Image: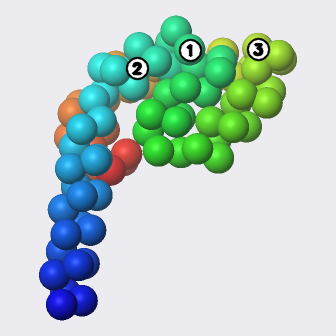
Amino acid sequence: MATSKRTINNKRKNNEASSRNRIVAAILAILLGGLGIHKFYLGKAGWGILYFIFSWTFIPAILGLFEGIIFLTMSDNEFQEKYS
């Protein structure tokens, strides 16, 4: 029974990871990166909160722009390996 629960949890994690889209993450990073929205989308809530707290400095906005460009230049396979 414990094995089947692990299998179900692994399938859920794989489905959640595969539902993340590189283009959506890039658009969120470029447009709303200053608020850390792309970090929440990628499942990195701690970083999202940190970006939001420091959003008044515009540093997260600059980082979000760079991250968005990086997401756009990645292949789908690289993106899934890194963010799944």
x and y, in percent, of residue 26 in the image: 40, 20
The type of residue carrying mark 2 is: Ala
* Amino acid type, label 3: Phe
Q: Position of residue 32 (x, y in %)?
A: 56, 14
Of helix, strand and loop, which one carries label 2?
Answer: helix
Dividing the image into 4 quarters, which one contains the N terminus? bottom left
Do the residues under discs 3 and 2 have CB atoms within 8 angstroms? no
* Few, some or many residues within 10 Å of mark 1 (<14, 14–19, 20+): some
Location of residue 51 (image quadrant): top right
**Residue placed at 37% from the left, 45% from the top?**
83
Left or right, 36 with respect to 50, comes to left
Residue carrying label 3 = 58
Q: CA distance from mark 2 to mark 1?
A: 10 Å
Q: Which residue is mark 1?
A: 32
Asked whether the viewer can see residue 66, the reply is: no
State which mark lies toward you, 2 or 1: 1
How far apart marks 3 and 2 lie (CA) works out to 18 Å
Q: Quadrant of residue 45?
A: top right
Quarter of the view holding residue 41: top left
Residue occupied by mark 2: 26
In the image, residue 68 above or below residue 9 = above
Q: Secondary structure at mark 1?
A: helix
